[in-house]
């Protein structure tokens, strides 16, 4: 079950260690706002930066970034130029970038950047480090006129406006069921739609949580099994499931009066009955402290059964032994071993 279990992780640490597969700001908890937008800060210290160009991530080991003398994140110009489709030229006095009719140039240690006939000052100079030429992040925004985002967890995104990043708004909106909830001392996250087709969503103070009628909610209002719609960052850590940050969460159903319990596991038995009920035995991992690892659940016509791939309805008759599921049920259980309860929702990994 270890490969199936959705486990909460420290969000910032995961992003540092992971590759990145798409580009845009990410703002998971818990971060402290940067005093300078070009220098992301976090509450852990020792922040590593991850460079993302047009959706392609670079390992911080192979492409290290650092904060320069002007307190701005410094970017290796050759790596960035080639990823953006520019040709890098070098003379005794300056370095240049060329692409189509565009031409730019600059010199090491000089705060003078030329784009065509325009000369700009950025308050930061190009630097030479470990044999590589670095330019300040503002060079890409103010000189090259590209979209630049410095995320507070260390993700540095540069996107060419002509090419874009291949993402559309629909790529950052997902619907489904909450299949895990994690709250730590410094971070919080929820799992959406399980493992194989799901996503982990970091929740911060900046995450907007509302009801379907736009009433303000909090993280504490989120419950296992809830149907939600999420707008999230385009940046995702290449974990399994992928990890990103939630920008807005819309809870699409009213919260139950009592806390929902949940078990992530495998169906060991399926027993249909003549009265239209189906009974399943599920064994796996409890999704909250008060949940159980092995549960017997009665499934009625009021039980919602959905697939993680497309959130389509599944009939109770389609459930079978060996299915990997997220089962949600109320707190009223029998005292038998294993306990018996009423299923409110079953989410099937399909």
Image: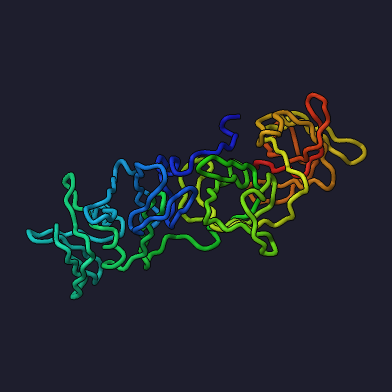
- Residue shown at the point (65%, 51%) measured from the top left: 176
The number of callouts visible is: 0
Residue 191 or 152: which is nearer the viewer? 152
- Residue shown at the point (37%, 42%) measured from the top left: 45
Q: Quadrant of the N terminus?
A: top right
Residue 105 or 137: which is nearer the viewer? 137
**In this rendering, is residue 104 above or below 268?**
below
Please state the horizontal and vertical placement of residue 25, each as a whole percent of the image: 44, 57
Left or right of 282, for residue 301: right
Left or right of 278, for residue 157: left
- Can you name the residue that lies furthest to the top here? 337
Please state the horizontal and vertical placement of residue 314, each as a whole percent of the image: 75, 46
Please state the horizontal and vertical placement of residue 138, each as a whole percent of the image: 29, 62
- Can you name the residue that lies furthest to the bottom here? 117
Q: Quadrant of residue 180?
A: top right
Left or right of 101, for residue 158: right
Q: Quadrant of the C terminus?
A: top right
- Residue shown at the point (36%, 57%) measured from the top left: 35
**In this rendering, is residue 148 above or below 11?**
below
Please state the horizontal and vertical placement of residue 245, each as a whole percent of the image: 51, 51
**In this rendering, is residue 303 above or below 126?**
above
- Can you name the residue that lies furthest to the right here? 275
């Amino acid at each position: 079950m270890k490969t199936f279990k959705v486990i909460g992780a420290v969000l910032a640490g995961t992003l540092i260690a992971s590759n990145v597969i798409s580009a845009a700001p990410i703002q998971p908890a818990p971060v402290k706002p940067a005093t300078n937008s070009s220098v992301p800060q976090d509450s852990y210290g020792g922040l590593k930066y991850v460079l993302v160009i047009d959706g392609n991530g670079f390992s911080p080991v192979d492409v290290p970034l650092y904060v320069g003398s002007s307190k701005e994140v410094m970017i290796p110009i050759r790596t960035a130029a080639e990823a953006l489709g520019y040709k890098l030229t070098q003379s005794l006095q300056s370095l240049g970038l060329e692409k189509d009719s565009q031409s730019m140039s600059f010199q090491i240690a000089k705060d003078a950047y030329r784009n065509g006939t325009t000369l700009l000052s950025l308050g930061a100079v190009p630097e030479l480090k470990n044999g590589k030429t670095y330019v300040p992040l503002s060079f890409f925004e103010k000189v090259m006129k590209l979209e630049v985002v410095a995320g507070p967890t260390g993700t540095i995104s540069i996107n060419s406006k002509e090419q874009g990043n291949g993402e559309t708004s629909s790529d950052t909106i997902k619907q489904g069921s909450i299949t895990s909830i994690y709250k730590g001392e410094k971070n919080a996250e929820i799992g959406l739609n399980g493992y194989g087709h799901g996503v982990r969503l970091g929740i911060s103070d900046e995450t907007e949580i509302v009801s379907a009628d736009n009433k303000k909610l909090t993280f504490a209002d989120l419950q296992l099994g809830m149907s939600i719609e999420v707008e999230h960052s385009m940046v995702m850590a290449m974990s399994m499931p992928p990890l990103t940050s939630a920008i807005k969460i819309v809870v699409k159903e009213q919260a139950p009066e009592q806390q929902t319990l949940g078990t992530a596991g495998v169906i060991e038995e399926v027993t249909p009955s003549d009265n239209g009920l189906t009974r399943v035995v599920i064994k796996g991992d409890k999704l909250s402290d008060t949940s159980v690892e092995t549960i017997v659940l009665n499934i009625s016509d009021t039980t919602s059964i959905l697939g993680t791939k497309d959130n389509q309805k599944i009939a109770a008759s389609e459930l079978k032994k060996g299915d990997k599921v997220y089962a949600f049920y109320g707190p009223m259980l029998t005292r038998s071993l294993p306990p018996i309860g009423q299923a409110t929702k079953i989410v099937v990994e399909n």
